[in-house]
Amino acid sequence: MELWIPITVAAAFLQNVRSAMQKHLKAVMGTTGATFVRFGFGFPFALFFVWILNQVVGYQLPALNAGFFVWAVIGGLGQIAATFLLVHLFSFRNFAVGTAYSRTEPAQAALFGLLFLSETVTPGVILAIVVSMFGVMLISVARTEFSWRALLTSVGSRTALIGLASGTLFGVSAVAYRAASLALGGPNFMMQAAVTLAFVIVFQTVVMGAWMLWKDRAEIGRIAKAWKPSLLVGLAGACASFGWFMAMTLQQAAIVKSLAQIEMIFTFASSVFFFRERINWLETIGCILIVGGILILLIVN
């Protein structure tokens, strides 16, 4: 088994944990604050990862270059914008439509990987991406009155366009992170990923911190009061991101993001075994499609 596979699965699991904790924080702070804590409380851990690899393991720090800075900034801003668009969807009554379209991220990452990095994917990988992507889209609308036919015919609606824009920006950020890490040229994938993560997460903390100082200073006070749970979110988020960055240094972003759909399986496992919730038939089909897409991906790789 190639190393990027278990790393991606672990990152997806940790991201699921982080998301669950962020939902808890929504009870004590706004959307901006709950989004900020993954960066603001995560960057100390990201810097610690670099320190461990350099001082304890003995890996040399890579030389930063213009290409790295450009790609890292593009990725950091793209991820922030994509997250805000995704959160904005929840203000719409039929937000499920946009959420479903935002799940096209792996397919869009494949396109941007081709455009920016000249990376191609095999027909088997394309099939895996399409199968798992439709599984996630099914799950996104499974608990609404919205029909699958209506979903396919609503591509021009406002929520669908916002969702597609979110997926586009997530796809761009994933490819940009891979490009930034590869631009470092060494000494190895772990240090390249750690340095990329450290720079990006500090950059995002500064950008979002400045935004809150300008637009919502009261949110900073709410974040400060919830610093203990926020610290746990930061730790889980930093560990998950470190996994994503390592995996995307080793493998194309589109392929990593396709396997990352396994996060939905973790989410449903939590719902069924811990919260005793029932899943409906559309969600079951969606899970089966995600697993099927992952199996195809593993077979062709």
Image (spheres, grey):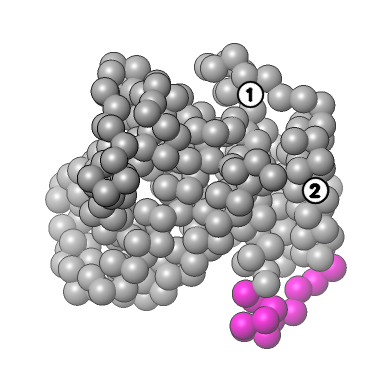
Q: If the image is split into quadrants, where does the C terminus sit?
A: top right
Residue drawn 49% across and 67% down?
17
Q: Is residue 199 above or below residue 103?
A: above
* Mark 1, residue position: 111
Q: Nearer the viewer, residue 14 or 206?
A: 14
* Mark 2, residue position: 295
Q: Is residue 160 above or below residue 236?
A: above
Q: Secondary structure at mark 1?
A: helix
Residue drawn 30% across and 67% down?
230
Q: Residues within 10 Å of mark 1 (few under 14, many from 20)?
A: many
Quarter-of-image position of residue 92: bottom right
Q: If the image is split into quadrants, where does the N terminus sit?
A: top right
Asked if the stretch drawn in magenta spans residue 273, the answer is: yes
Q: Is residue 236 above or below residue 120?
A: below
Q: Nearer the viewer, residue 268 or 183?
A: 183
Residues drawn in magenta: 270-281
Residue drawn 62% across and 83% down?
275
Asked if the stretch drawn in magenta spans residue 229, the answer is: no
Quarter-of-image position of residue 38: bottom left
Cβ atoms under marks 2 and 1 closer than 8 Å: no
Instruction: Report x, y in % for residue 203.
Output: 25, 39
Residue 224 in sight in this render: yes
Residue 172 in sight in this render: no
Q: Amino acid at mark 2?
A: Leu
Marks 2/1: CA distance? Answer: 22 Å
Q: Is residue 7 above or below residue 219?
A: above
Q: Secondary structure at mark 2?
A: helix
Going from N to C along the chain, the mark reached first, 2 or 1, is 1
